[in-house]
Image: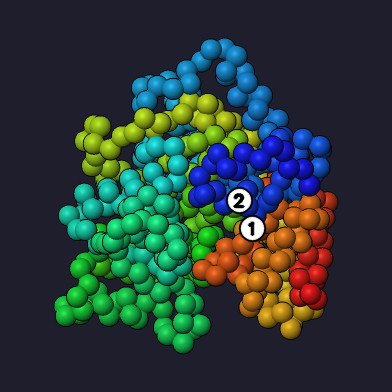
Amino acid sequence: MTVTADTTSLESGVRSYSRTWPATFQRAKGSFLYTPDDEQYLDFFTGAGVMSYGHNNPILKDALLRYLTEDNIVHSLDMLTTAREDFLTTFTEKILRPRGLDHTVMFPGPGGANAVEAALKLARKITGRESIVNFTNAFHGMTLGALAVTGNSMKRGGAGIPLVHATPMPYDDYFDGDVPDFVYFERMLADSGSGLNKPAAVIVETVQGEGGVNAARLEWLRQLADVCKKYEILLIVDDIQVGCGRTGGFFSFEEAGIVPDIICLSKAISGYGLPLAVTLIRPELDVWEPGEHNGTFRGFAPAFVTAAETIRTYWSDDTLEQSTITKGAFVEATLNSIVAKRPEGELTAKGRGLIRGLEFADPEKAAETCRNAFEAGLLVETSGPRDEVIKLLPPLTISEDELTNGLTLLRNATTAALDD
């Protein structure tokens, strides 16, 4: 483990990942991070899913370097540029149209919270209603609007003011199957005495990443879409962490066969770790006035370049999608094996595609497993309301040998924690 000069005293106490992994990283390639002393760490974190196509992907790097060396536009607000036009055309022709989506593309700012804030603001503008329905254990960002529809009490506590205009509802299987899906929500909507203001929108993650890798059943998602349609409520899907191929298809809701009114994307959309966020809007809902919602970094040109190249390279056919599904099944089988062989650990395997989780009955054992993994050269983080779930986010481009090696390291780390 390499630790260079201690600069932590120069940084705010809000830092978190550098506490979990006390090493200084210098460079990265493919599925690995390296310290200045060339110590190697297999990355099953990938910047919380940002680096889905691996670190310094050579195809994307070449496209970026060509663009920069030709003195092309880097920053231009929302002026027309060749990079912007290339991304819009490529994204529309290779992602939206083949999936039967006609959504318009909005660039709300550089990060996922910007995409969520724009979605919430637009839903309220369209409907004239203020209330948003969110779900237990949801995470949608750290700005005030996004935080209001987030479930985690620790994160909400950082707001410093009451977080209002949002009503939480139970996520899929919140009551362990004891309560029929949406019976509470629909009763509240139908009862004029319930006190629930008719919502402008429902916002949902198909797989709750920060919330503990909770994967909603496809039938639950379809029922949610039906409820929204029945009561004329807009449906917002936050696909920031689990979109862009993380579950197999480009959008995580494709398998459910639903069409959200508004879709939020960020993290892996640029393909190279450059800041970019997108809010997709059904055309009849695009009622913004020019400049009514803006921001300085609403379209970072180098990110357009790598995003368009990512789509052309990995989404012109279904090769990556099928690979992700196959690798995801392999991870699922491995996690199920770990669970079966250690019943005393009360472990649970969770997730879809290449976002997977291993839930521990004892959060301390989850933390110990992460520490063991780090010492062995594997980066994994915890998630969930008690940090009881180890979340796996390997690159979609990871090789079979690297994936197998990482899972072996995880198995060993888990075994050591449970034996301690």
Front residue of 5/229: it is 5
> Residue 288, relative to residue 403: is it above or below?
above
| Residue for point 76% across, 49% down | 42
Q: Which residue is mark 1?
A: 381
| Residue for point 31% across, 34% down | 294
Toward which corner of the image does residue 183 lie, by quadrant? bottom left
Residue at the front extreme, as displayed = 9
Q: Quick one: label 2, few (<14), some, or many (20+) residues within 10 Å?
A: few
Mark 2 and mark 1 residues within 8 Å of each other at the beta carbon: yes
Q: Which quadrant of the rendered structure holds the C terminus?
A: bottom right
Q: Dot 1 lies on which element?
A: strand
Where's residue 370, x and y in %? 70, 61
Toward which corner of the image does residue 345 lie, by quadrant? bottom right
Q: Dot 2 lies on which element?
A: helix
Q: Which residue is mark 2?
A: 17
- Which residue type carries mark 1? Glu
- Which residue type carries mark 2? Tyr
